[in-house]
Image: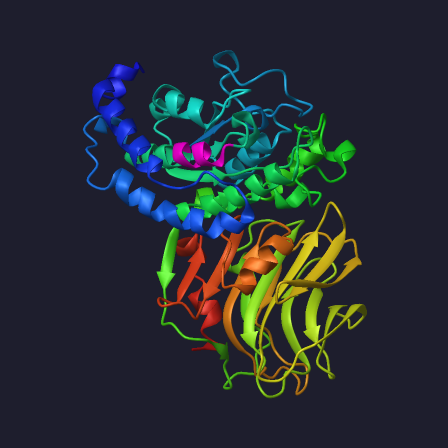
Amino acid sequence: MPLDKLVNKESLQSHRDKVNNAFDAVDLNTAGLTDASTRIGSIEQFNTDAFSGLDESFINSSIKGPRKTVVIFGSSNGAGLGASTYIGDPSEANGYYSPSTSWAGLLEARIKSLDSDFVFYNRSKSGSNSSVSVERFWTDVAPYRPSHVVLCTALGNESYDVRNFLKNTATLIKYCEQIGATPILRGSYPRNAGMDADKYNSCIALNLAIEKFGYPVIDHLSILDNGDGTFFDSATYSTDGTHLTDAGQVQFYNCIDPSFFLGTCNIDYRPSGAGKISDSTTSSIGIRLSAATEMILGNIDSAAASVSFNSGATPENSRILTLYFSPIIECYCDSLGEVLIRENNGTVLLSTGSIIQPNTDYTVLFSYSYPREIIEVFLNGQLIGSVSKSLSGMYAATLCGRNDLPTNSPNGYTFSSACLYRTSKDINLAGRLQNGHISYSSLLFAADFNSSTGVEYMPNLIKNNLTGQISPVWEL
């Protein structure tokens, strides 16, 4: 469809000028982690300045409406370069298809297996960046009338200019909203060539900042990050230090929750206040997330979970959280108060030496990386232990669990937040969790009981209908 049929070009340019002027007033020039909180906090003000009272007369309303159409809109990574089935960027000649072994192709196959009405188009273009995406949106995305747009250009393609990436992302989000599409955001990911400490800080800062836009975010950095922005085991997961092998494509695909596309993005508001396991129940379930609630669609290879709590008068003999891999793994506080990682059969895999003291506030982050075959546990922002273990296929999780003694009794912990992620996480998140930050990247579930609204966030909340799973055993 010609551009002049989609938009009024003069009005569109006026809109872009307003966005640029608003962003010029935002101080986002530095990318160091020390400035991250100030920088990302200003995004909300930018959105207000750039888009309040916006005249949307430039858009043809005929292209709006609900569909089951996904557009992958990125650069070479989104196009599938490196995958064994890649024969060139998606094009009109091949129907703009995604290579079947690329992360986008695997995602397409998965979504279609769950809902065959979905249609995918891959309009990714090698070498593209966010500025090019803004220019291409109305000709290469809008005519498909998509329900979802995956925004996935490479930060490295614009010289790690976080400010420019965020400005253009804000514009692309607004364009998606104007055509009735849900934007799915993706920030930075590992890259070997030219990576240094400043660029790595830019990657982390960008991924933190895009969470502030309020839309689903895919975390493609944590899963294969070697701790410095380069690829872990590059020979296995990357063809050239930039693009992904088939094994790397699988790891990127696994970070994406199908529920982003199948459910309704929403936020459920509950009464605020810290919560605890109800004294009136003997159930073993705390907050149980599983396929039964359609919370976990398909097994998950890498995962992370966090809980924040006050330990109460008797913190011993308590299951803090349980992840149902094969085998089942628990983060457990033993009879002496020590934090352990153990298998469900009682075999201790890791004794951390860290003691949970009575009536004390703690934040625990548990993470498992499938590529590394490593379990890590963090307490109050610090790594307290790691252990090698081969796990497979997480199919359920229990957050804020129960006591072992007395059997199946509720523990005395008072929980303030709980999160579950579809990828491994690292010390960067552990430190932010300790300061009250909940990450929304590759997030499956979050409950913040101490917030002013008592927000529980689930990307597919209506589909999950999780209330019935919490209510028998949870009280505020």
Residue placed at 60% from the left, 36% from the top? 199
> What's the magenta region?
161-168
Tell me: 11 left or right of 171.
left
Q: Is residue 66 visible?
A: no
Q: Position of residue 253 (x, y in %)?
A: 60, 39
> In the image, what residue occupies the spot 35% across and 66% down?
453
Q: In the figure, 219 relative to 326: above or below?
A: above
Main secondary structure along the magenta-highlighted residues: helix
| Residue 437 placement (x, y as % from top left) | 49, 59
Residue 136 sits in quarter: top left
Residue 329: give x, y in percent of width and height: 71, 64
| In the foreground, 143 or 337 | 337
Q: Residue at x 46, y 43 (%)?
A: 210
Can the viewer see residue 308 in this picture?
A: yes
Residue found at the very far top of the displayed protein: 93
Q: Nearer the viewer, residue 465 or 234?
A: 234
Q: Quadrant of the C terminus?
A: bottom left
- Front-lying residue, 5 or 171: 171
In this rendering, position of residue 214 left or right of residue 190:
left
Q: Is residue 113 above or below residue 319?
A: above
Q: Quadrant of the N terminus?
A: top left
- Seen in the picture, residue 422 relative to 328 is either above or below; the reply is above
Quarter of image, res 336: bottom right
Q: Is residue 34 above or below residue 396?
A: above
Residue 152 on the magenta segment? no
Q: Where is residue 450 shown, x and y percent of the image? A: 43, 71
The reply, left or right, for residue 370 in relation to residue 402 is right
